[in-house]
Amino acid sequence: MEIYERHSNDSEIIIIGIKDQGALFADQLCQEIHKLSPLKCTQAQMSLNKVKPTSADVQSNIELSTLKNKSVLLVDDVANSGKTMFYALGGLMKATPKSIETVVLVERLHKRFPVEVTFVGMKLATTIKEHIEVKLNGQNDWTVELK
């Protein structure tokens, strides 16, 4: 597992899933890390207004102070335009973590925001008008639709 290889010198990583689908994916990711490695995986959730992200502060169920000098993975299902990930990353910067890496199931290659995805399940080249949607059908059963 690439995540464990990169963090084998860490005793803990903090995985923050962006609600809703990103949080479900983060939960499954944490379970897999527990199965495959001795790495402690602390899970949290983050929410923000995906349509108007500047209308309210980013909310999280973990104190930002606990992220100080920690390795953080920010998880979402899809990086469509990059906007959600961009604003979520901004909310984490105040915490001064050791590192922040991003994880998505599907990365759309036509993003409008400057977000680099560290760990990607699948990359899709799409047109500007196309949209990617990911659905969780059951434990470890995901469907990707291009609309």
Image (spheres, rainbow, N blue to C red):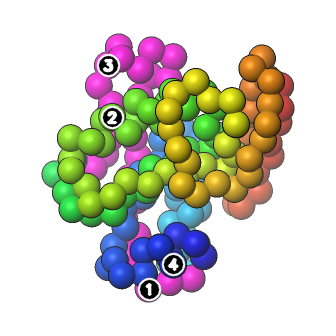
- State the residue position of label 2: 90
Q: Which amino acid does label 2 sit on?
A: Gly
Q: Give the range drawn in magenta.
A: 36-63
Left-right relation of 85 to 65: right
Q: In which quarter of the image is the C terminus?
A: top right
Residue 125 at what x, y percent from top left? 79, 36
CA distance separating discs 2 and 4: 26 Å
Find numbered disc 4 in the image and state the secondary structure of the residue it sits on. helix
Q: What element carries label 3?
A: loop
Q: Which mark is residue 38?
A: 1
Q: Earlier in the sequence, mark 2 or mark 4?
A: 4
Among numbered discs 2 and 3, the one appearing first in the sequence = 3
In the current view of this chain or complex, which residue is farthest to the left?
A: 65
Q: Work out whether mark 4 precedes mark 1 in sequence or the reverse, and give the earlier one.
A: 4
- Taking depth in this image into account, of 71 and 15 the one nearest to the observer is 71
Q: Mark on residue 56?
A: 3
Q: Mark 2 or 3, which is nearer the eye?
A: 2
